[in-house]
Amino acid sequence: MIGGTGVTGALIAPSILTADFGNLAQQVRDAEAGGIDLWHLDVMDGHFVPPISFGKEVVAAVRDASDGRFIEAHMMVARPSEQFADLADAGAQRLIFHYEAAGSLEASREHIRMCRDLQCQAGIAINPETPVEAIAPLLGELDEVTVMLIRPGWGGQAMRPDLLEKVSDLAARVRAEGITLAIEVDGGVKAHNARSCVDAGATILVAGSAVFNPQETPQEAVAGLRSALGSD
Ligand code: DX5
Ligand code: ZN
């Protein structure tokens, strides 16, 4: 599984929220030339979070520009299951829904089953106020968990380092249960704090404004992240 525990080195998953959408295909190719591992595409519906970002059309555009890298959809939407099929059809190979949107363990299990029926991996994201405890009974059924290190909805926010404790908590549970699970951190990951995320137990780092920013090319930005991780 991509980004599962036990891999050496963390994977880098760019979010295109702050990319130049007028040149999206080139931005995708530039980031891939820099050596990114997978795409983290942030779908927002204006309900679960205030902004609207994009849906299946942009996911398909990234897939078409990509050389075939893995795509996950981070669904900040109020009714995720209604979009599962469209996003899978557009190229998403992992569907990450919010526990807060599903609303219960039972509903989450139904969402996971729907992801599997579409031959997709299943991931759950948890907001800053949701404890890891809330999703603990599901860990053995999931491929991935996204720990939000910011309030979801906007790129370019500063990470809340206190939330890395949730990552350590999650990593300890995964170790104790002997399961394989990708542990992703999302929000404010930069070269200066990437190492602390991995030390806490993250296996996938989402990086939006760290990769797509006006100061450097995506290739340079990815190289900076890799070197901060000591894996270049
Ligand atoms: C926020 C999204 C994130 C975020 C990443 O709601 O889920 O993926 O935009 O962007 P940065 O790295 O700029 O926080
Ligand atoms: Zn995200």
Image: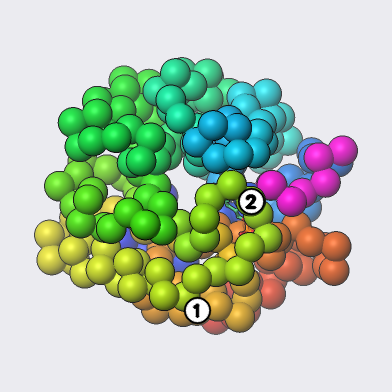
The answer to whether residue 119 shows anywhere in this view is: no
Res 109 quadrant in image: top left
Residue 224 x %, y %: 69, 75
Q: Residue at x 65, y 39 (%)?
A: 51
Q: Which numbered circle lies on residue 195?
A: 1
- Residue found 81% across the figure and 40% down from its top: 21
Mark with earlier residue (1, 2): 2
Give amino acid for label 2.
Trp
The secondary structure that most of the magenta stretch takes on is loop
SS under mark 1: helix
Q: Which residue is mark 2?
A: 154
The segment highlighted magenta reads 16-22
Residue 176's place in the image compared with 43, above or below, is below
Crowd rating for badge 2 (residues with CA inside 10 Å; few <14, some 14–19, many 20+): some
Q: Is mark 2 within 8 Å of ligand 1?
A: yes
Image coords of residue 176 (percent x, y): 13, 66
Q: Amino acid at mark 1?
A: Arg
20 drawn magenta = yes
Q: Classify residue 97 by image quadrant.
A: top left
Crowd class of label 1 (few under 14; some 14 to 19; many from 20; radius 10 Å):
many
Q: Are marks 1 and 2 in contact (CB under 8 Å)?
A: no
137 left or right, relative to 85: left
Q: Residue at 33%, 73% (x, y): give it.
A: 165
Nearer to us of marks 1 and 2 is: 2
